[in-house]
Amino acid sequence: MKFHLNLRSAWNLDELHKKERNHPIHKHWKYGITGPSGHMDNVIVNIEQCGKTDYTGMMETWSILEVMRARMVDLEQMLHHVMEIEAKTGKQAWILYVMDITGLQYNKKLYDLVTGSMKSLADFMADHYVEMIKYFVPVCVPSFATALYVVVRPLLPEKTREKIVKNAQTVNVTYGKTHVVTKFIKTGGKLRWWVRGNRNFGFGVFYSDEEQVSDFFIAKQVTPCFPWMPGPTLVPMEDEVIVKKDAYYHVWVSNEKSWWRTLEVQLLVESE
């Protein structure tokens, strides 16, 4: 905390969200805040065009300090939006950080980038802003990304790589199968979950009047269902909801789209 407060004082961060995005870097690193999620309470969506942003060119043109100085404007604007929602609702708010990887091409410079200067930026975000981010969601992920992740995973910040939850269980889901945790919860109770997987998988939370559900694709959703998400999961997905109806609540993990590989997930589901 003292480390972060010292940074806020040194760079006058409390006023930075008011600054215009007029650094030359901002011409290449586009503004990403889109607005409220519309599906998750107190969540703002930020979309970063990772596949179309010339990070290598930036790092070859400006120092890491100058890149970070420009990026801080966006980070502080995200934080300001989060704090505005928290002031209005009295509840914690977050950023849903969508990474659009459309158009990303693999080359040696990409590997050097993610193991060098971009790791430094990732360390910085982990030290100062990781609790502001609810989920990192990569989309349009190219096939080589999983292999690259395996190589660079040991270099990721500890907070990002190993956000472990006590009592989480490891579950192996065979190809073509699903794993469902079902709990009956009364109105006003809470359901919370934490999950991460080692490869692509589907995930959803549903409720029903009956304990058995034959088809989750027509069941009532507690949160938006993702039939397929790219993995491995960089940051675990975790959330909690206050139940509005006496019902059976189902946390659904799917490996149905896999033809031959087993999915391994760390999963925690609690109710009260």
Image (cartoon, rainbow, N blue to C red):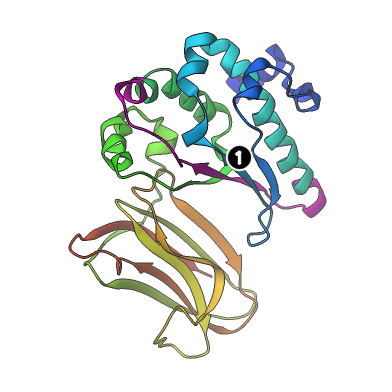
The residue wearing badge 1 is 132
Taking the view exactly as shown, the residue that stands out farthest to the left is 260
Q: Position of residue 191 (x, y in %)?
A: 53, 68
Taking 32 as reference, is 124 above or below it?
above
Q: Position of residue 97 (x, y in %)?
A: 56, 43
Query: In terms of depth relative to the viewer, which is nearer, 161 or 260?
Result: 260
Q: Position of residue 216 (x, y in %)?
A: 44, 79
Q: Position of residue 173 (x, y in %)?
A: 25, 66
Taking 21 as reference, is 82 above or below it?
below
Q: How many marks?
A: 1
Residue at (67% x, 59% y) in the render = 41
Magenta segment: does it hold 79?
no
Residue at (54% x, 36% y) in the render = 130
Query: In terms of depth relative to the viewer, which is nearer, 143 or 70?
Result: 143
Taking 79 as reference, is 179 above or below it?
below
Q: Which secondary structure lies at badge 1? A: helix
Magenta segment: does it hold 102?
yes
Query: In terms of depth relative to the viewer, which is nearer, 187 or 76?
Result: 76
Q: How many C-alpha atoms fall within 10 Å of the one at disc 1: few (<14), some, or many (≥20)?
A: many
Taking the view exactly as shown, the residue that stands out farthest to the bottom is 210
**Residue span colored magenta:** 86-112
Left or right for 109, reference 217? left
Left or right for 55, reference 166? right
Find residue 104 and report its image quarter. Answer: top left
Residue at (22% x, 67% y) in the render = 175
Find residue 67 and report its image quarter. Answer: top right
Find residue 1 and report its image quarter. Answer: top right
Mark 1 residue type: Met
Residue at (82% x, 51% y) in the render = 88
